[in-house]
Image (cartoon, rainbow, N blue to C red):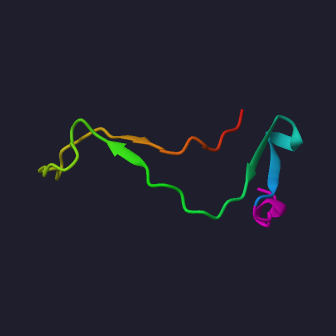
Amino acid sequence: MPRSVRRAAFGAVSEWFQGAGGAGAVCEFVYDDASPQKPVVTSPDYPEDQLQDGVGVYGTFTMDSPSDTAPACP
């Protein structure tokens, strides 16, 4: 990532090219120093608020962001 991106001012749009030699899609972001909301984590194998004997037991988890703004690049 270019050094100028790391020094971006709060609220400023920074962009870079995804690909070699500046060719490809343009990606951009706006620096925001606010802490994100905590993720929503669910599991059919480990239901919320129930004690489980989970040591060594496999389970599946789904993680989602409560935010409607997420980083994206084409």
The prevailing secondary structure element of the residues shown in magenta is loop
**Side (left or right) of 16 relative to 61:** right
Magenta residue check for 42: no
Q: How many marks?
A: 0
Position above or below: 13 against 59: below
Residue pictured at 72% horizontal, 58% vertical: 31
Q: Where in the figure is residue 62, as x and y percent of width and height?
A: 37, 38
**Side (left or right) of 29 relative to 21:** left
**Side (left or right) of 16 relative to 33:** right
Position above or below: 14 against 35: above
Choose top left, top right, bottom left or bottom right for residue 72: top right
Q: Where in the figure is residue 70, as x and y percent of width and height?
A: 60, 43
Q: Nearer the viewer, residue 36 or 55?
A: 36
Position above or below: 31 against 49: below
Q: Where in the figure is residue 14, as x and y percent of width and height?
A: 81, 53
The image quadrant where one finds the N terminus is bottom right
Specify the segment rendered in magenta. Answer: 1-10
**Side (left or right) of 42 relative to 46:** right
Q: Nearer the viewer, residue 27 or 67?
A: 67
Position above or below: 36 against 26: below
Choose top left, top right, bottom left or bottom right for residue 23: top right
Residue pictured at 16% horizontal, 53% vertical: 55
Residue pictured at 13% horizontal, 49% vertical: 52
Q: Nearer the viewer, residue 58 or 16?
A: 16
The image quadrant where one finds the C terminus is top right
Magenta residue check for 9: yes
Residue pictured at 82% horizontal, 49% vertical: 15
